[in-house]
Image (cartoon, rainbow, N blue to C red):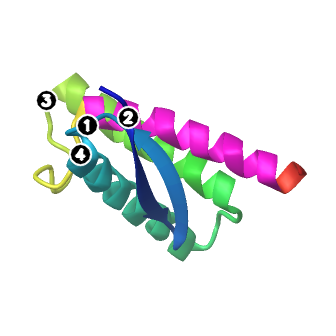
């Protein structure tokens, strides 16, 4: 089975992401969660730049995941929170998208 290309929006910017068949909804859910985290960070106004906002969001989400696994407490609104596997997959895809974004800035 080959991957399908899915377009996700983060902070009103579109990214094409390769996604295994059947995982499109999980990717979309993860992207919505990440987008909301990034918007919250941007609204706070202390972090500037897409890459820095993305890194801060990744750190915050990682911290939520570690706390959830460590003490058994659920992440706020856990019904809408992506699973650990979804977060790992999204993190990998975000790394890839940021790498492509950096290449566009350099070129």
Residue 2 picture quarter: top left
Q: Crowdedness of circle 1 by 10 Å Cα count: few (<14), some, many (20+)?
A: few
Mark sitting earlier along the chain (4/1): 1
Question: Residue at the spot x=32%, y=40% of the render?
Answer: 64
Counting other residues with Cα less than 10 Å from the Cα at mark 4, is it few (<14), some (14-19), or many (20 or more)? some
Label drawn at residue 26: 4
Residue 21: assigned label: 1
Name the mark nearer the viewer: 4 or 1. Answer: 1
Residue 34 relative to residue 54: left or right? left
Q: Helix, strand or loop at disc 1?
A: loop
Disc 1 to disc 2: CB gap under 8 Å: yes
Discs 2/3, front: 2
Which sits earlier in the primary sequence, circle 3 or circle 4? 4
Q: Residue at the location (34% across, 37% down)?
A: 87
Q: Mark 3 points at which residue?
A: 72
Q: Which callout, 1 or 2, points at the residue further toward the start of the chain?
A: 2
Between discs 2 and 3, the one toward the N terminus = 2
Q: What stretch is highlighted in magenta?
A: 85-104
Residue count near mark 3 (Cα–Cα under 10 Å), binned few <14, some 14–19, many ≥20: few
The structure residue drawn at horizontal position 26% and vertical position 47%, both measured from the top left corner, is 24
Place of residue 90 in the rendered image (x, y in percent of width and height, measured from the top left): 40, 40
Mark-to-mark CA distance, 2 and 4? 14 Å
Residue 23 horizontal/vertical position (percent) = 24, 40
Task: Mark 2: give few (<14), some (14-19) or many (20+) Cα within 10 Å.
Answer: few
Residue pointed to by mark 2: 3
Closer to the eye: label 1 or 3: 1
| Alpha carbons under labels 3 and 4: distance apart | 23 Å
Task: Kindly check if marks 3 and 4 are in contact, taking CB atoms under 8 A apart as contact.
Answer: no
Q: Could you tell me which secondary element the residue under label 3 belongs to? A: loop
Q: Which of 73 and 40 is in front in this view?
A: 40
Frontmost residue, 59 versus 30: 30
- Judge whether residue 97 is colored magenta: yes
């Amino acid at each position: 089975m080959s991957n399908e290309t899915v377009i996700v929006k983060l902070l009103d910017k579109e990214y094409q992401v390769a996604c295994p068949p059947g995982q499109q909804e999980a990717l979309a859910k993860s992207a919505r969660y990440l987008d909301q985290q990034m918007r919250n960070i941007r609204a706070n106004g202390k972090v500037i730049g897409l890459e820095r906002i993305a890194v801060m969001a990744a750190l915050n989400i990682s911290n939520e995941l570690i706390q959830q696994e460590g003490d058994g407490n659920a992440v706020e609104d856990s019904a809408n929170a992506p699973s650990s596997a979804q977060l790992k997959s999204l993190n990998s895809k975000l790394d890839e998208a940021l790498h492509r974004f950096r290449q566009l800035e350099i070129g």
